[in-house]
Image: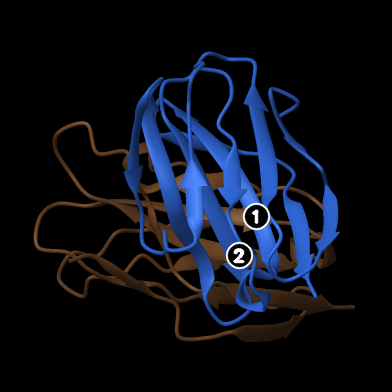
Chain colours: A brown, B blue
Amino acid sequence: AQRVTQPEKLLSVFKGAPVELKCNYSYSGSPELFWYVQYSRQRLQLLLRHISRESIKGFTADLNKGETSFHLKKPFAQEEDSAMYYCALRGSGGSNYKLTFGKGTLLTVNP
Amino acid sequence: DAGITQSPRYKITETGRQVTLMCHQTWSHSYMFWYRQDLGHGLRLIYYSAAADITDKGEVPDGYVVSRSKTENFPLTLESATRSQTSVYFCASIQADTQYFGPGTRLTVL
């Protein structure tokens, strides 16, 4: 079974402060990890995926297989980063395109 | 993003009524999904479809029915709506590892 845990339902930081949204997973194989974001009144959209190793809107996330984590980080938070963030996992192999989502973390960046 | 649409965007219904939520995509993606989003539960997969006429259950399928006669449409039906089905419903399709979501339907069951 695969599981994604986001331990923080709510996270509040001040503008310019570093932010880290935690994500831990449980999966027996080699997973693919993603972060999705939902801004207010908008649809969910992909923020980044671990295989691309890219930085999007200043966010990065490193897959740590030893700690089974995929934390999302940004060194200097901006007010426009306020949103709901979902970590998601996809199992490896085959044609299984299903994603398992965490429960989400609502990030609020205060001015 | 405009490639996947949902209707209606808002729906209020009563317990016991049948409700159908529509999802339409213009990309011809093979895989499509239905999720419900609830506070404290995040996104949970209801049903998914690998292609026309191929559907399978997700995590929370009870009380829901899907069909997929055409690649571009993936309707979700609540056969007899219950209050516990009050939620926001998202349809999604997938292309090259990226899931593209619709705008959501906010359903209230009274």
Q: Is residue B38 left or right of residue A52?
A: right
Residue closest to the eye, A55 or B7 = B7
Q: Residues within 10 Å of mark 1 (few under 14, many from 20)?
A: many
Residue closest to the eye, B89 or A42 = B89
The outermost residue toward the right is A111
Q: According to the image, label 1 marks what residue?
A: B89
Q: Is residue A32 left or right of residue A84?
A: left
| Mark 2 chain | B
Q: Is residue A11 left or right of residue A86?
A: right
| Vertical comparison of A33 with B82: above or below | above
Quadrant in the rendering for residue B52:
top left
Amino acid type of the residue tagged 2 in the rendering:
Gln
Quadrant in the rendering for residue A111:
bottom right
Residue closest to the eye, B81 or B50 = B81
Q: If you read the primary sequence from the N terminus, does the residue marked by circle 1 or circle 2 appear first?
A: 2
Tell me the element at label 2. strand
Q: Residues within 10 Å of mark 2 (few under 14, many from 20)?
A: some
Residue B59's spot in the image, x, y percent?
36, 62
Q: Residue at x 15, y 71 (%)?
A: A66
Residue A8's spot in the image, x, y percent?
53, 86
Residue A44's spot in the image, x, y percent?
65, 49
Label of residue B6 in the image: none
- C-beta proximity under 8 Å, tags 1 and 2: yes
Q: Quadrant of the N terminus of chain B?
A: top right
Q: According to the image, label 2 marks what residue?
A: B37
Tell me the element at label 1. strand
Residue B91's spot in the image, x, y percent?
59, 42
